[in-house]
Image: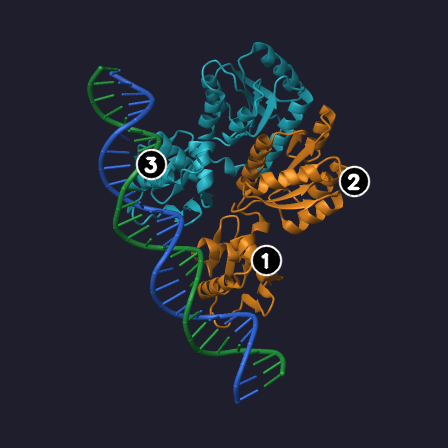
Chain colours: A cyan, B orange, C blue, D green
DNA sequence: TACCTCTGTCAAGAAGCCGTTAAGATCAGC
DNA sequence: GCTGATCTTAACGGCTTCTTGACAGAGGTA
């Protein structure tokens, strides 16, 4: 990777200055945002190789930023936070963050963890960053948060969309009940498997030609669900 | 991933006991080693989804273990260490570790970081050679939880699949009745060898050209079963 | 040959999971 | 505060899957 692109979402000017000095010195290209909204815009427009995210933003909760980001992007996210509570860490990591570094942080460790994240990304290779998915009549654009069925836009509720987006991210493979519940409803809902049944019915009614005989949204009895690929 | 396999390389018995309790309760399959050498052997033979490695081993340096492991495996490694120095962290992370957790550690955080590592691995997924198996017309894709017979997908119930997957993991070698029962039905079912006969019949009916004369799913009388490997 | 153990097959009842519907609770926008 | 959309929760029928019992065949042994 010639010059890795990093988006820093952080409101404290001191820390931004500090990161700017440390990262540009190491050959990173840096883009900065002071709010969650701006950060999401930067992440979308700069196509970064890595996102560094402060949890304590003025406009929105850090977890919400991760969640929004993860709807369309698999870019590695390193969380930077002054909150050192275990439950904050667990929530961020389960919410889609790839690493969690407490403040105050040692810059050498942060740089090492950044190298790990970039290594992971390099292993994935180019195409799995794909943000659109098509099978049969069904087309999902994760970047634009749009779902088309035979060319016509289908409106999905937030939960319906998150459920579908999760299946898209793992298209072709079985996603277990636990995993779906954790990624859509959060780690406290792992036992509520009836949610899944209700929302799978919704999705099938909106997306399947014959909801009683699913072509795309397949049940793997006793295990989970799978979105048919190609 | 049905039941993630974890290899723990750690010499302190207390911490091993602690990890055993924490991980098996979360649905992980655990294999343990007390030395670096044993750990490398376990990692090679168990094909784990994740390795947890203590840096302070009696026989060899933790960094050396990572290095040897990385010569042939990309399995995620989480380092557990009492040494909290920044240079130790940087060395481990740059040496090939995927994460670094200091002792004493919070179990919730460790579990969350494990889920992150498994998520990364799942995204790599698909083509990785180690998770698919082929013999004759029969093709088993453990990563996607799919079974193909002459190119056509075969539907297996959860127990049927777990039984086949266990045989695949030991392909070519005999797996004893006890071991199959333990891995498929759990440790309380080791005496129910009846189950095995019923489900082996199911599998053969679904997978064998002539179920009465098995080509793939072979009986080893008095011992167990074996899946033919080419 | 007769007997015994191990193995394979079939089938039926039980149990649990899944899909569907609908009603009340909650939230967001006006 | 009203209204419509969305989410949660409960109920229930149907269906797959699991468990269990019965029995027959294979193969070894006295």
The chain containing the residue under callout 3 comes to A
Number of the front mark, 2 or 1: 1
Question: Residue C4: where, in percent of width, then height?
Answer: 55, 76
> Residue A100, labelled with which disc?
none
Q: Mark 2–mark 1 contact, CB under 8 Å?
A: no
**Location of mark 3 (residue):** A148
**How many numbered marks appear?**
3
Question: Residue A149: where, in percent of width, then height?
Answer: 32, 39
**Location of mark 2 (residue):** B60
The chain containing the residue under callout 1 comes to B
Asked if badge 2 and badge 3 are on a common chain, one would say no
Asked if badge 2 and badge 1 are on a common chain, one would say yes
Q: Nearer the viewer, residue D21 or A190?
A: D21
> Along the horizontal axis of the image, is A159 left or right of A29?
left
Q: Is residue A163 above or below residue C3?
A: above
Q: Mark 1–mark 3 contact, CB under 8 Å?
A: no
Q: Is residue A28 above or below residue B14?
A: above
The chain containing the residue under callout 2 comes to B
Question: Residue B64: where, in percent of width, then height?
Answer: 76, 39
Q: Is residue B95 above or below residue B152?
A: above
In the displayed image of the protein, which residue is found farthest to the right?
A: B59
């Amino acid at each position: 990777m010639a010059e890795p692109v990093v988006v820093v979402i952080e409101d404290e000017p001191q820390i931004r200055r500090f990161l700017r000095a440390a990262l540009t010195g190491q050959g990173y290209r840096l883009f900065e945002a002071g709010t969650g909204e701006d950060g999401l815009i930067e992440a979308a427009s700069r196509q970064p190789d890595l996102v560094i995210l402060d949890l304590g933003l003025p406009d929105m909760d850090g977890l919400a930023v991760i969640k929004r980001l993860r709807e369309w992007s698999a870019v590695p996210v390193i969380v930077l936070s002054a909150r050192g509570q275990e439950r904050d860490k667990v929530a961020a990591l389960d919410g889609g963050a790839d690493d969690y570094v407490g403040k105050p942080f040692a810059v050498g460790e942060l740089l090492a963890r950044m190298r790990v994240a970039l290594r992971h990304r390099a292993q994935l290779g180019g195409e799995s960053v794909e943000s659109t998915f098509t099978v049969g009549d069904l087309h999902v654009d994760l970047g634009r948060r749009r779902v088309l069925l035979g060319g016509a836009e289908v409106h999905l509720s937030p939960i319906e969309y998150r459920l579908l987006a999760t299946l898209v991210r793992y298209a072709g493979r079985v996603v277990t009940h636990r995993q779906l519940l954790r990624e859509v409803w959060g780690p406290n809902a792992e036992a509520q498997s009836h949610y899944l049944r209700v929302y799978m019915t919704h999705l099938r009614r909106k997306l399947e030609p014959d909801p009683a005989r699913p072509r795309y949204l397949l049940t793997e009895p006793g295990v989970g669900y799978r979105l048919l690929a190609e």
